[in-house]
Image (cartoon, rainbow, N blue to C red):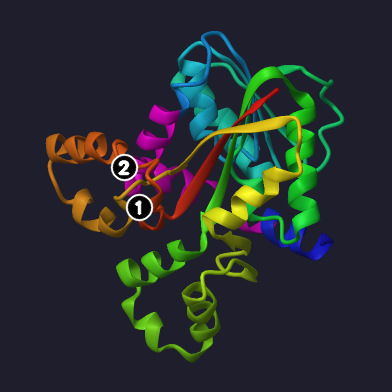
Amino acid sequence: MREEKEAIREHYNSNPRKEWDRLQKRFPHEKYITTQMMDRYIRPGSRILDIGGGPGHYSIHYAKKGHTVTLLDLSEGNVKFARQKARQYGVKITAVQGDALDLSRFADDSFDTVFLMGPLYHLMNEESRLQAIREAVRVLKPGGYLFSSFILMFGGVIYGLRELPETILMEKEQPYFEIAARGEGTSMEAFTYAYLTTAEEAEKHFASVKELETETVFGQESILAPYANILRQKPRKIREAWYEYALRYCEKRDYLTHSEHLMIISRKK
């Protein structure tokens, strides 16, 4: 686990801007749909903990809305970048380096809202993922909401078809395509160490956490992930119309495989 953790930290330390630009320039529909869904549950003036908050997209977004936000990330590079971006946007956030598996610096029931939008797809075994969820629940106030993200296994198929169609002929990629076709999840070394899952498998992580009840499950790109490159070439008015239309599909079970990322919204009893 130590080797995996260091590799993940180094991956994000090497280029914090890449993840910032991913949501800012390449996949803004993911952030739009995600925040639209989250805004249905986040109360005004919330105290938010953004675990695995990366370069700060969501922390800064909600700080701009008047929330009190603490970002925690494994990567020192991400933390530094998030602080710089917060200053650039004229908002205040607290950004600290830390591990999703150990939130002992925070007291029980100390946050109104918790984001867990990165760690679950970098923790390679189920017990570690459950530990991260339990730690997030511990610091969440009763009645508060937990927002948890996963990478969908079929998202890799979408990515291959959209960005690198030749991967279907690559021998080294065949084990991945076979697992995806069987409708299973797996832990693997991809862009870095990553856990890719199905909706059903993702939901099972929460079944044993009795303090939580699931409010909704949705695809963070809704129906738009396969068409991201096409959308990016269209005028803003057309893009935004598709974003709004896609919101009508994001919670529909039949369309979850159109997304690369899945979010589960849970409430602490």
Labelled pair 1, 2 in contact (Cβ < 8 Å): yes
Image vertical order of residue 198 relative to residue 120, above or below: below
Residue 114 seen from this side:
yes
Between the residue at mark 1 and the residue at mark 2, the CA separation in whole angstroms equals 7 Å
Q: Is residue 34 magenta?
A: yes
Question: Residue 125 location in percent, x, y?
Answer: 75, 60
Along the horizontal axis of the image, is 85 left or right of 232?
right
- Which residue is identified by label 2? 249
Image vertical order of residue 183 relative to residue 126, above or below: below
Residue at the extreme right: 104
Question: Residue 224 location in percent, x, y?
Answer: 29, 50
SS assignment for the magenta stretch, majority: helix
Image quadrant where residue 157 sits: bottom left
Q: Amino acid at mark 1?
A: Tyr
Question: Residue 195 location in percent, x, y?
Answer: 63, 61
Give me the residue at 57% from left, 16% from top.
92
